Amino acid sequence: MRKLAWLLGLSLFCLWGVAAPAGDKKDFFFKNGDRVVVMGDSITEQHLYSNYLEMWTVTRFPTWKLTLRNVGIGGDTSGGGNGRFKRDVLAHDATALTVDFGMNDGRYNLGAFDEKAFAVYMKGLQGIADQARAAKVRVAWITPQPVEHNPGAKGELYNNTLEKFSEGVKTTADKNGGLFVDQFHPYWAVIKKARDNGEKGRITAGDAVHPGPPGQVVMAASILKGLGFPTLVSSAVIADGKAVDATNCVITAVKASAEGVEFTRLDAALPFFPEEAKGILKFSPVLTDMNQLDLKVTGLKSGKYDVALDGKVIGTYPSGDLAKGVNLAEGALKAGPIADQVKGVRKAVEDKNRYFHDKIFRGVLLAGSKSPDFKGATGKDLEARRKELYDERMKEMPAKDEAVRAALTPRAYVVSIRLAKSEK
């Protein structure tokens, strides 16, 4: 009965999660010039949802000067985050912080709710809040995501604990004036929808605790929606061979002909979706929900039309659909100039984050005397060498941040809408 009550109660939240709009009207939590630190446990240290957060943010705001550092540590708890705040948050002169703990704090207890563990969790969160307030760091307090075992498995009883801990996250956010971000219920809504449609296996991939790309893209999208992320990339309207509206883009060189229309489009943003997460699209329209790359073309004669970017066909649409408006994001991310640029941006982001994690965070800050870089040093000698190496390697980070910004430079491309070959 207990499990049934939990599932029924969660179903109500699921309905809310499905119906929630993609990116509400509140301001986006991240700002131009922010130095963002992403803190959490092993799920954060996987560098999946955090990379997706960063990719969506920088591609949506390519002119921003933004830095992001992931300081997730496997096995960590809110108390651990509180204890390392000075080293891992203040050291980066952070202006914004995301906090995602709870998975380990609940101690994987499948029985009665552990009030003592909850009190320790809340104490750790409050410690982080106190330090953030003193340092004037804005905080987004993120709930843990649910675990996903096979349907009916006893391990999913842990979600009772995680849901209670999520309530604790809201209490902390409300008490301290931070932003509460619920990823628990939207994440479960996707799982429930898949199961309702007959899915028997794990849809979020990875393991029950550590989602693979399909699950982590749901995490990232849920978090970004909670942060007020704008889903519009850009929108253009061409009517009777003329550009009549352009939002977040510039349209030039419009040329109409009997077979269609052609123009040059310069977008002020880019879409993003990780190809390795595409399995989730069977159950959730994350790609199109998070990326509105819209095009509306009226005045075309009846028929089907190929839409090409720099000569690469990304989709074929009936004239009626084009007249109503279509979202080009999915096709544009598969091939062509937008796909090529996004791949370049992603490489720069991942190179930067891999260097920071491997060479600085794990390679220096968390490394012990057995590391070859420290050659058996101990005590004060070890700490002196750690500081020296940290300072030396951190000098590389500005160039890596700049490589991301360089890859984001907006690029114009030619859009051609021509009668499909089958129509000729």
Image (spheres, grey):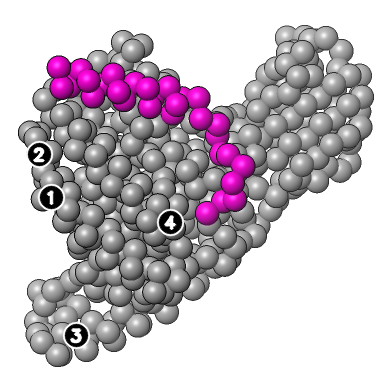
Mark 2 vs mark 4: which is more N-terminal?
2
Check whether the beta carbons of the residues at disc 2 and disc 1 lie within 8 A of each other: yes
The tag on residue 109 is 2
Q: Which amino acid type is shown beneath numbered disc 4?
A: Gly
- Would residue 205 appear left or right of 413 to someone viewing this image? left
Residues tagged 2 and 4 counted as in contact (Cβ below 8 A): no
Q: According to the image, label 4 marks what residue? A: 178
Quadrant where the image shows the N terminus: top left
Can see residue 3? yes
Which secondary structure type mostly characterizes the magenta part of the structure?
A: helix
Marks 2, 4: nearer the viewer: 4
Q: Which residue is mark 3?
A: 383
Q: Earlier in the sequence, mark 1 or mark 3?
A: 1
Alpha-carbon distance for marks 2 and 1?
10 Å
For the image shown, how many numbered marks are present on the structure? 4
The magenta stretch is: 1-29
Categorize mark 2 by other alpha carbons within 10 Å: few (<14), some (14-19), many (20+). some
Tag 1 residue: 117
The answer to which of marks 1 and 4 sits earlier in the sequence is: 1
Residue 15 included in the magenta stretch of the image: yes
Residue at the spot x=74%, y=30% of the render? 295
* Amino acid type, mark 1: Ala
Q: What's the CA distance linking mark 3 and mark 4?
A: 35 Å
Q: Residues within 10 Å of mark 4 (few under 14, many from 20)?
A: some
